[in-house]
Every structure is written in C-alpha cells, then in structure tokens.
C-alpha cells in the first residue's frame, strides 16, 4: 500500500514534467517521461487495488 501511494506522486511528477517538456519542443524527452509516468501510474493502481500484492506469499 505504501509503495502504491509513493508511486502515484512519482507518476504525477513525471507526467507533469513531460507536459512542460512538450511545451519546450523536446519531443523525445517528453514522450519518454509520459511513458514512464504512465507505467508508474499503472503499477501504483495495481498495488493500491490489491491486484498485485508482492507480500501475498509471505502472509500464509
């Protein structure tokens, strides 16, 4: 749960940074930041919803 919350903030930072890079005409950097932000956001959603739980095998 904690890692999911942290990843949401990191994803928001990367996506906003990508938006500001797009305004400065850095297409490669902004596209890369958007992809990284989207992957981080998707991973945080998986962690927060419990679909992916890295500690599920240890709780038995």
Image (spheres, grey):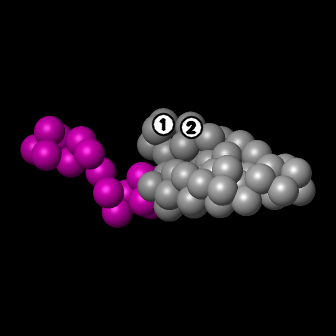
Task: State the SS at label 2.
Answer: helix
Residue at the far right in the pictured view: 23
Residue appearing at x 57%, y 59% in the figure: 35
Q: Is residue 24 visible?
A: yes
Task: State the SS at label 1.
Answer: helix
Residue 9, picture quadrant:
top right
Of 33 and 26, nearer the camera is 26
Image spot of residue 21 (x, y percent) = 80, 50
Residue appearing at x 30%, y 51% in the figure: 53
In the drawing, what numbered circle is on residue 6? 2
The majority secondary structure of the magenta stretch comes to loop
Number of other residues with Cα within 10 Å of mark 2, as a class: few under 14, some 14 to 19, many 20 or more: few
Q: Is 2 placed above or below 41 here?
A: above
Image spot of residue 59 (x, y percent) = 17, 41
What residue range appears in magenta?
A: 46-60
Q: Are marks 1 and 2 in contact (CB under 8 Å)?
A: yes
Q: Is 22 placed above or below 17 here?
A: below
Q: Quadrant of the N terminus?
A: top left
Image spot of residue 44 (x, y percent) = 50, 52
Disc 1 versus disc 2: distance between alpha carbons?
6 Å
């Amino acid at each position: 749960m904690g890692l999911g919350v942290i990843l949401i903030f990191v994803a928001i930072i990367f996506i906003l940074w990508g938006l500001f890079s797009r305004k400065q005409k850095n297409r490669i950097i902004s596209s890369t930041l958007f992809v990284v932000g989207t992957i981080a956001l998707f991973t945080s959603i998986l962690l927060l919803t419990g679909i992916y739980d890295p500690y599920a095998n240890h709780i038995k």
